[in-house]
Amino acid sequence: GNLYPAPRNQAYTLDRAVTAEKYSGNYNNFYEFSLSKTVLPEANALKTKPWTIKIDGLVEKPFEIEVEELIRKVGLEERLYRHRCVEAWSMSVPWTGFPLAKLVALAKPLSGAKYLQMQTFMDKAVAPVQRQFIYPWPYTEGLTMAEAGNDLAFMATGIYGKPLPNQFGAPIRLAVPWKYGFKSIKSINKISFVEARPKTFWEGLQSAEYGFWANVNPAVSHPRWSQASERVLGTEQRVPTLIYNGYGEQVADLYKGLEKERLFV
């Protein structure tokens, strides 16, 4: 707790107000606990301390590390990021954490590693929706090595100047602000460096609507709704959505040569 608030990195600013915690903290997708936006108090049943992340796959030496030890190794900073949900709502929040690239460097991946596969916890005793077999648990997400190395890819351990509350994905989650929110996996306990592209949770459940890339694009509609605009939590205003959620200058080059891919689902 004495690590928060962390120094703010002034390179990451916003053109809109930060969403008040009273709105963002009570409007969360965390399907392990509930299919509604209200995941409290169910999410508070998850014990997040101590919490260990397993690093394996195509690395020099697989290992496990507690989140507190990881933080001591890499340090913390605060960044202001937009967050755009595939459901066409958005928020802007101050994440505390560290660049994912620092964890990648710590893992020392081998040359054959092409992707990061990330998974969250699996505990049916505390996560009631994990008892429903229609879902491909545990929640799994993935990035290319190039995406993971982009400086915007961020491992968040805190928000609003304090450690992450459970509903935000405590004790450690991903934040990739140019992608739809379901890519930003919560409560990560395993990261595998792999050669083959992983099948992600939503891709496995409904691939026609939710694919691997999920880059924000207002010109490409979801099969059931438009992505041209978004509802801002707190103000309830509708504002135009920006390509790559406004981060195109930093990430567009990642996708050159991939025009035939379904980059926006």
Image (cartoon, helix red, strand yellow):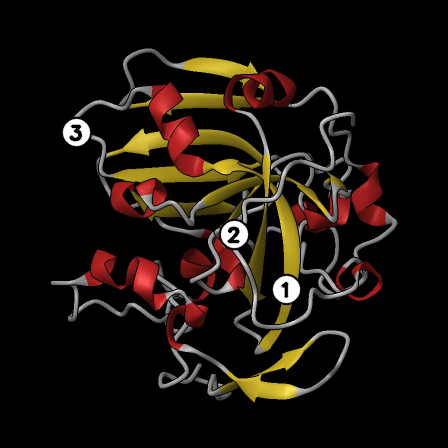
Point out the frontmost of discs 1 and 2.
1
- Circle 3 packing at 10 Å, graded few (<14), some (14-19), many (20+), is few
Residue 75, above or below 139? above
Point out the frontmost of discs 3 and 1.
1
Residue that label 2 marks: 184
Residue 128 appears in the figure: no
Q: Give the x, y percent position of residue 97.
A: 58, 37
Rendered image: mark on residue 187: none
What is the C-alpha distance between the residues marked 2 and 3? 24 Å
Residue type marked 2: Ser
Residue 72, above or below 147? above
> Residue drawn at (79%, 45%), measured in percent from left and top?
43
N-terminal-most mark, 1 or 2: 1
**In the displayed structure, does residue 247 sit left or right of residue 253?**
right
Rendering quarter of residue 135: bottom right
Rendering quarter of residue 121: top right
Residue type marked 3: Gly
As drawn, the residue found furthest toward the right would be: 41
Q: Quadrant of the C terminus?
A: bottom left
> Residue drawn at (70%, 38%), measured in percent from left and top?
124
**In the displayed structure, does residue 42 sit left or right of residue 30?**
right
Residue that label 1 marks: 92
Asked if the residue at tag 2 contacts the one at tag 1, i.e. Cβ–Cβ closer than 8 Å, the answer is no
**In the displayed structure, does residue 77 sit left or right of residue 112?**
right
- Circle 2 packing at 10 Å, graded few (<14), some (14-19), many (20+), is many
N-terminal-most mark, 3 or 1: 1
Q: In what element is the residue under mark 3?
A: loop
What is the C-alpha distance between the residues marked 3 and 1? 36 Å
Residue that label 3 marks: 112
Asked if the residue at tag 3 contacts the one at tag 2, i.e. Cβ–Cβ closer than 8 Å, the answer is no
> Residue drawn at (38%, 14%), measured in percent from left and top?
62
